[in-house]
Image (cartoon, rainbow, N blue to C red):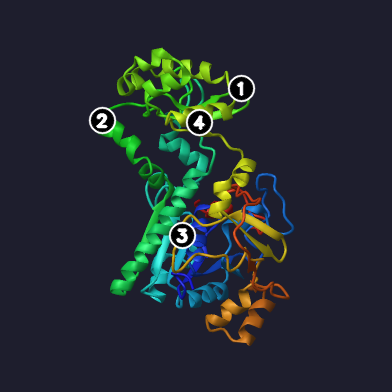
């Protein structure tokens, strides 16, 4: 039994932020019903970092476990009525349409609240529900650029550098997940539902509470130097340095200890806090030159003996092989009816009494249409009519429950295909989606 067992979530989202938020609710036990077009969500088959699958790509698999699929045409009155019937029996309604699209489809907060006053309605957008940018597509790289974060890394004169992960999508997802949980707690205490709005721009700003406060409170601007540096507001040395056979990450060591470890007396004469900022480029150059002389293993051993924060720089293959990752069970593996053995990142939290688990892998299109509609009050005859009229779709034979295996280290990457715009394979407009 999961913490959210007994709660139903309607997931009308696409790309990464919305699906990840909904999946986390599912990981905690919620019954998440993924509502998608009768031809299936376009992201099922869109290119995902070059990885291919039998029917589902790696990205879709990684973001849609622990969900059931209801494939329905929301542009029809019958399709909207089917989802409304489901909303009447649900706790959370999550969508990431562009502003105005939910209203056109009858899936907006006022409509859903009229059907179920206790609903927790989570709306995710790129820039906010209103304002001059409300209609813009929300996309991770664009929001990274707009957030100011790119100027906190790198070298003056080089182009601003994006993060190596879809950071804004993930931050937005966890903001929506957090908001949904808080609103559910409020509902438990008061019986009241409410609207929860989350946007990628605010999430990107909020996560920089330290950096932006250094600027707004302390008045210190971002200053990139002539040497590569990991963060403009952190003293040197801070970043990744080449060794004889690879790279090592070095984080904010006391300059006297580092000088002793590297046999650089000049560092020991410097003030760690003052010179670490004022003479950042000079320090970085000294460390860069010295670290190139030995192997990564030699440096990690030596720096560790001096109590200096240092670590290896991993590829994904290295991550999967790491003994701590294996010990933690950071990845989960299960059998999927179309993709075979699937391994993806697991759960970011642990609970002693109600641990998260994989109850289902990502569903095939409309896999659960029949059972979800039956739970919403439709008779077998009504479901058959909707299928015959192509209002909904379902496979001839349900794929059934997926079997969860013990967490192991293995393959599985979750690339982002979260672009908005263009047209999806099923003919729906991608620009309807916000993030």
Q: CA distance from mark 1 to mark 3?
A: 39 Å
Q: Earlier in the sequence, mark 3 or mark 4?
A: 4
Q: Quadrant of residue 187?
A: bottom left
Q: CA distance from mark 1 to mark 2?
A: 40 Å
Residue 419 in sight from this viewpoint: no
Q: Is residue 282 left or right of residue 369?
A: left
Disc number placed over residue 37 in the picture, else none: none
Q: Nearer the viewer, residue 393 or 9?
A: 9
Quickly name the residue at label 4: 249
* Secondary structure at numbered mark 2: loop
Q: Position of residue 391 (x, y in %)?
A: 63, 73
Q: Residues within 10 Å of mark 3 (few under 14, many from 20)?
A: few
Quickly name the residue at label 3: 350
Q: Spot the residue most to the left.
A: 217
Q: Earlier in the sequence, mark 1 or mark 4?
A: 1
Q: CA distance from mark 1 to mark 4?
A: 14 Å
Q: Position of residue 34 (x, y in %)?
A: 56, 66
* Secondary structure at numbered mark 3: loop
Q: Position of residue 151 (x, y in %)?
A: 43, 29
């Amino acid at each position: 039994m999961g913490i959210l067992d007994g709660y139903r979530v309607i997931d009308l989202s696409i790309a990464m932020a919305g699906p990840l938020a909904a999946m986390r609710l599912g990981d905690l036990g919620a019954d998440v019903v993924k509502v998608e077009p009768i031809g299936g969500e376009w992201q099922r088959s869109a290119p995902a970092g070059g990885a291919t699958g039998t029917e589902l790509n790696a990205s879709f698999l990684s973001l849609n476990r622990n969900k059931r699929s209801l494939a329905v045409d929301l542009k029809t009155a019958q399709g909207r009525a089917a989802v409304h019937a489901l909303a009447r029996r649900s706790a959370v309604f999550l969508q990431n349409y562009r502003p105005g699209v939910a209203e056109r489809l009858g899936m907006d907060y006022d409509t859903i609240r009229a059907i179920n006053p206790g609903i927790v309605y989570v709306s995710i957008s790129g820039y906010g529900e209103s304002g001059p940018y409300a209609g813009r597509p929300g996309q991770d790289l664009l929001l990274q650029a707009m957030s100011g974060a790119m100027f906190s890394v790198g070298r003056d004169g080089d182009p601003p550098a994006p993060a190596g992960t879809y950071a804004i999508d993930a931050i937005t997802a966890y903001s929506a997940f957090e908001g949904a949980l808080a609103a559910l707690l409020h509902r438990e205490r008061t019986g009241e539902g409410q609207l929860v709005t989350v946007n990628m721009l605010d999430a990107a700003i909020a996560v920089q509470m330290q950096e932006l406060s250094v600027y707004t409170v302390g008045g210190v601007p971002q200053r990139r130097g002539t040497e590569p540096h990991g963060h403009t507001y952190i003293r040197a040395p801070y970043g990744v340095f080449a060794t004889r056979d690879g790279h090592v990450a070095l984080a904010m060591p006391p300059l006297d200890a580092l000088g002793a470890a590297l046999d650089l007396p000049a560092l020991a004469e410097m003030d760690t806090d003052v010179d670490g900022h004022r003479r950042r480029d000079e320090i970085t150059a000294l460390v860069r030159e010295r670290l190139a002389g030995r192997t990564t293993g030699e440096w990690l051993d030596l720096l560790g003996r001096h109590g200096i924060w240092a670590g290896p720089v991993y590829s994904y293959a290295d991550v999967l092989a790491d003994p701590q990752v294996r010990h933690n069970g950071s990845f989960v593996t299960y059998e999927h009816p179309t993709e075979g053995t699937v391994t993806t990142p697991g759960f970011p939290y642990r609970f002693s009494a109600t641990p998260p688990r994989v109850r289902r892998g990502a569903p095939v299109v409309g896999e659960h249409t029949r059972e979800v509609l039956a739970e919403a009050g439709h008779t077998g005859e009504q479901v058959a009519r909707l299928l015959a009229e192509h209002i909904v779709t379902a496979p001839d034979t349900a794929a059934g429950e997926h079997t969860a295996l013990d967490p192991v280290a293995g393959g599985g990457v979750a690339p982002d295909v979260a672009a908005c715009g263009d047209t999806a394979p099923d003919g729906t407009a991608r620009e309807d989606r916000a993030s």
